[in-house]
Image (cartoon, helix red, strand yellow):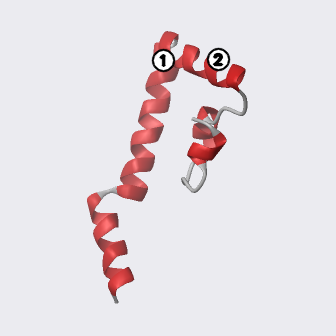
Amino acid sequence: MSEIAAEGLPIEGDLTWLIARSPKDFAEKLSRLLTDEEWNEKMLVLAAKLIEKMFSEKIMIMQLKRALE
């Protein structure tokens, strides 16, 4: 993803690798994700953990309740 796409997302650790800072960087990262199955799986697991931690239904309900109090 571009730096603009990543803006505001709670991306940390190894997931920061996904942020491309140039068109060449974007192409290289995409190529690796398409050809390196082990790396792709690692990124998938990390992203799924982040989504569960930050955006699960339970978390969203809790945040909405706080916002409406």
Residue designated by label 1: 38
Instruction: Tell me the kind of residue under disc 1.
Output: Glu
Numbered circles on residues, count: 2
Alpha-carbon neighbours of circle 1 within 10 Å: few (<14), some, or many (≥20)?
few
Considering the numbered disc 1 on the image, is that residue within a helix, a strand or a loop? helix
Indicate left or right for 41 with 6 as reference. left
Considering the numbered disc 2 on the image, is that residue within a helix, a strand or a loop? helix
Against 65, residue 35 (above or below) is: above
User: In this orientation, which residue lies closer to the viewer: 10 or 2?
Assistant: 2
Against 47, residue 24 (above or below) is: above
Q: Which mark is residue 61?
A: none
The answer to whether the residue labelled 1 contacts the one labelled 2, judged by CB atoms less than 8 Å apart, is: no
Q: Which mark is residue 28?
A: 2
- What residue lies at 27% left-to-right and 60% top-to-bottom? 57
Against 67, residue 35 (above or below) is: above
- What residue lies at 71% left-to-right and 19% top-to-bottom? 24
Indicate left or right for 69 with 7 as reference. left
User: In this orientation, which residue lies closer to the viewer: 24 or 63?
Assistant: 24
Rendered location of residue 33, percent (x, y) = 52, 19
The span from disc 1 to disc 2 (Cα, nearest Å) is: 16 Å
Instruction: Tell me the kind of residue under disc 2.
Output: Glu
Looking at the image, tell me whether mark 1 or mark 2 is earlier in sequence order: 2
Q: Quadrant of the N terminus?
A: top right
Alpha-carbon neighbours of circle 2 within 10 Å: few (<14), some, or many (≥20)?
few
Q: Quadrant of the C terminus?
A: bottom left
Give the number of the mark in front: 1 or 2. 2
Extreme residue in the bottom direction: 69
Rendered location of residue 48, percent (x, y) = 39, 41
Rendered location of residue 62, percent (x, y) = 32, 73
